[in-house]
Amino acid sequence: MIKILKFFIIVFLVNSSFAFSETIKPNVSINPNQVIEIQLKGLMKNDSPYRDMGIEQTWEFAHPNNQRFTGPIDRFKEMIKGDSYNMLLNHISHEIKEIYSDDKNAVYEVVILDQNKKYFKFKWQVEKFLESGPLKNCWLTTVVSQPIPMGSST
């Protein structure tokens, strides 16, 4: 019962945070699947309510090692807007399927339908941050593969 209650609280907070245009911060109560859902929902409405909010939301859940590699934030924004990942911006829909998970790692297959009605598949990996500090035991994204084109919906 407590798990169900926690789940509904998280869903409420996720939806409320987007409604009030504040980015959601990592915390220990957010599970790996929810991390990816938060990132994808942000990217789905990237420029609402302000420009690049979705990219900034995605950055919040990037593992610090990932941030060092892809950052700073302005460089990360350029990367997401580039040819490799721009199909994630303002996409129409997405599906998340768990491939593997344990107590420290989780790997998912993510399929998105972009604005041009083309499907792309990604491997999305999150890891539990084990070092001390404010992110300790939070799930964070470590890897997002290059997209694999899967054809169109028409």
Image (tube, rainbow, N blue to C red):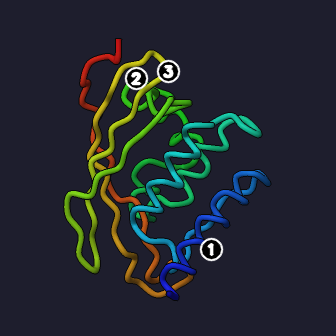
Q: Which of marks 2 and 1 is in front?
A: 1
Image point (34%, 18%), residue name: 153
Furthest residue in direction left, as rendered: 100
Tell me how far mark 1 sits from mark 3, CA to CA: 31 Å
User: Which residue lies under the disc numbered 2?
Assistant: 83
Please indicate whether residue 45 sits to the left or right of residue 116 in the image. right
Local SS, label 3: loop
Please say if 119 is above or below 103. Answer: above
Please say if 32 is above or below 137. Answer: above
- The image shows residue 91 at horizontal and vertical percentages of 50, 30
Tell me how far mark 2 sits from mark 1, CA to CA: 36 Å
Q: Earlier in the sequence, mark 2 or mark 1?
A: 1
Please indicate whether residue 146 sits to the left or right of residue 138 in the image. left
User: Which residue lies under the disc numbered 1?
Assistant: 9
The residue under label 1 is which amino acid type?
A: Ile
- Residues 30 and 153: in front is 153
The residue under label 3 is which amino acid type?
A: Gln
The residue under label 2 is which amino acid type?
A: Asp
Image point (50%, 60%), residue name: 61
Furthest residue in direction right, as rendered: 20
User: Which residue lies under the disc numbered 3?
Assistant: 115
- The image shows residue 133 at horizontal and vertical percentages of 52, 84
Label 3 CA crowd tier, 10 Å (few <14, some 14–19, many 20+): some
Q: How many dots with numbers?
A: 3
Please indicate whether residue 56 sits to the left or right of residue 83 in the image. right
Local SS, label 2: loop
Q: Which of marks 1 and 3 is nearer the N terminus?
A: 1
Label 2 CA crowd tier, 10 Å (few <14, some 14–19, many 20+): few
Q: Nearer the viewer, mark 3 or mark 2?
A: 3
Contact? badges 3 and 2 (CB < 8 Å)? no
